[in-house]
């Protein structure tokens, strides 16, 4: 099910391979944002979000409910919304039995608020709380994912996830804005969650589940709307490890943003897009007519699993104007000057291996179970030296080579990047913060290192992250 990547524009089009407060600081690209301490804020001013044990119906009755972890006792993951220029002020209370921190996946955040427990902050201990306070510089769709060094897979696999939506100052005209957050659960026959920490999962494809939910409920989500209603779907993959492709059946869909950043609006060829963990798409579409079959967003797993059904109901609405781009992000550079860029090669290694003499056998791993994966020979540790150090506003080109036996989904923290063409003779016309690299391939990404701090290049399959597949770089 892994998608075919690097995810070039050609791959996307071909479907290869898926009340908050006023702004306190300038957006990224201006002055550095000042540090904010929990003691500086009155507790009543911040929204509270409590992570605690709960129960959720992950399979239809008569299957039993599953013990999970949830925010505020709700099986539906939270969707936090702010307008561009407003500050996020969120006090997270940890009432689980494990350390916790929340990564704002896709936000070009200030470093202290990036939410990597053990690197950018101390993990929030059971019974403790932490105040996240920052002003997102960009409009767009981001994920909220648990991310603690050595302990990210379990809180995610138990259900903790969410979405942050930063609305544009002038959003596109749509009738409904619909979040669709995908999660993947590994259940035992009695409905409980399978044990965590299994080396065989971490060393191979990760913790792939046997039950899918969208917005915390068994798939598919049903969206009823009048024919002609214009929808904005915010699709986000919060699975621990599952990479898939998504297809739009019976729907004329336009991609308006990739990984939260606006792009030239386009229709994906064969109505199919790659969808590895951490990826987000903003999709614009009009509900089909009442005489047409219901449309569906389908995950290409097995013969296809519908994630959402779009059902026409009611009297048709007036025709909407043609779909148009939602606007560019003027904080991002129009180009990245590659001639004098700082360049670094990064090799991804480790994991289970296949026995060529026994092609039918499962891959096997032998070695330290806490250091299964490496970047440039080192498993991720906060005490490791940086992969590289650059001064602020340096153009950086990373050549990432996957020497493992598995596709690797990777995320660049604190920045967005362009995927370069093989000869550095151009780049794909959209910004990314997450992509998937097939085994045996090399991809080059370019970005402007304009955000000071210690930032990660990390696996989005969280069992791999827990067992070494990350490193950090520094922008001074």
Image (cartoon, helix red, strand yellow):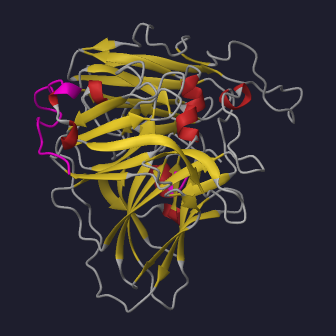
Q: Nearer the viewer, residue 108 or 14?
A: 108
In the rendered view, tell whether residue 30 sits above or below residue 309.
above
In the rendered view, tell whether residue 426 sits above or below residue 121.
below
Residue 27 on the magenta span: yes
Query: Magenta region: which residues?
Result: 14-39
The image position of residue 358, as x and y in percent, is 89, 29
Residue at the location (21% across, 47% down)? 329
Q: Main secondary structure of the magenta part?
A: loop
Q: Quadrant of residue 48?
A: top left
Residue at the location (28% across, 32% down)? 131
Q: Nearer the viewer, residue 134 or 50?
A: 50
The image position of residue 71, as x and y in percent, is 44, 46
Residue 461: in sight, yes or no? no
Residue 113: in sight, yes or no? yes
Q: Quadrant of the C terminus?
A: top left
In the rendered view, tell whether residue 70 sits above or below residue 391.
below
Q: How many marks?
A: 0
Q: Give the side of residue 309 with respect to residue 163, left or right.
A: right
Q: Quadrant of residue 353?
A: top right
Q: Give the side of residue 243 with respect to residue 362, left or right.
A: left
Q: Give the side of residue 116 with respect to residue 293, left or right.
A: left
Residue at the location (36% across, 35% down)? 425
Q: Give the side of residue 91 with respect to residue 297, left or right.
A: left
The image position of residue 64, as x and y in percent, is 70, 57
The image position of residue 309, as x and y in percent, is 53, 72
Residue 298 on the magenta span: no
In the rendered view, tell whether residue 173 sits above or below residue 474.
below
């Amino acid at each position: 099910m892994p998608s075919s990547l690097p995810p070039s524009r050609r791959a996307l089009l071909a479907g290869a391979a898926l009340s908050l407060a006023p702004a306190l600081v300038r957006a990224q690209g201006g002055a550095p944002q000042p540090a904010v301490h929990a003691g500086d804020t009155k507790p009543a001013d911040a929204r509270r979000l409590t992570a605690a044990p709960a129960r959720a119906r992950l399979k239809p009755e008569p299957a039993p409910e599953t013990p999970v972890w949830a925010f505020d006792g709700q099986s539906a993951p939270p969707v936090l919304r702010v307008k561009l220029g407003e500050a996020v002020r969120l006090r997270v209370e940890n009432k689980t039995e494990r350390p916790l921190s929340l990564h704002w996946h896709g936000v070009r955040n200030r470093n202290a608020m990036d939410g990597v427990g053990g690197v950018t902050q101390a993990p929030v201990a059971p019974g403790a709380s932490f105040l996240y306070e920052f002003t997102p510089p960009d409009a767009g769709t981001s994920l909220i994912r648990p991310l603690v060094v050595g302990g990210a897979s379990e809180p995610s696999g138990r259900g903790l996830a969410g979405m942050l939506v930063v609305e544009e100052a002038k959003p596109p005209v749509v009738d409904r804005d619909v979040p669709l957050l995908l999660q993947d659960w590994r259940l035992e026959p009695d409905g409980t969650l399978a044990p965590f920490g299994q080396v065989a999962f971490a060393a191979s494809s990760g913790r792939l589940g046997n039950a899918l939910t969208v917005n915390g409920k068994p798939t598919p989500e049903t969206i009823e709307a009048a024919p002609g209603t214009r929808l904005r779907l915010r699709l986000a993959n919060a699975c621990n490890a599952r990479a898939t492709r998504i297809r739009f059946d019976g729907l004329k869909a336009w991609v308006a943003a990739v990984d939260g950043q606006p792009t030239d609006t386009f229709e994906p060829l064969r109505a199919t897009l790659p969808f590895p963990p951490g990826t987000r798409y903003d999709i614009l579409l009009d509900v089909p007519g009442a005489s047409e079959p219901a449309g569906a967003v389908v995950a290409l797993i097995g013969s296809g699993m519908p994630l959402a059904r779009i059902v026409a109901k009611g009297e048709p609405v007036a025709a909407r104007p043609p779909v148009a781009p939602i606007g560019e992000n003027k904080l991002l550079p129009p180009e990245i000057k590659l001639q004098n860029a700082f360049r670094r090669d990064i090799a991804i290694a480790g994991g289970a291996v296949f026995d060529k003499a026994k092609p039918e056998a499962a891959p096997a791993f032998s070695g330290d179970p806490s250091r299964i994966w490496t970047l440039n020979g080192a498993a991720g540790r906060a005490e490791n030296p940086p992969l590289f150090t650059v001064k602020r506003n340096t153009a950086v080109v990373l050549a990432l080579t996957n020497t493992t036996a598995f596709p690797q989904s990777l995320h660049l923290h604190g920045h967005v990047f362009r995927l370069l063409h093989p000869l550095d003779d151009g780049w794909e016309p959209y910004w990314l913060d997450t992509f998937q690299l097939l085994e045996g391939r090399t991809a080059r990404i370019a970005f402007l290192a304009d955000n000071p701090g210690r930032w990660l290049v990390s696996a989005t399959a969280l069992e791999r992250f827990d067992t070494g597949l990350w490193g950090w770089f520094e922008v001074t």
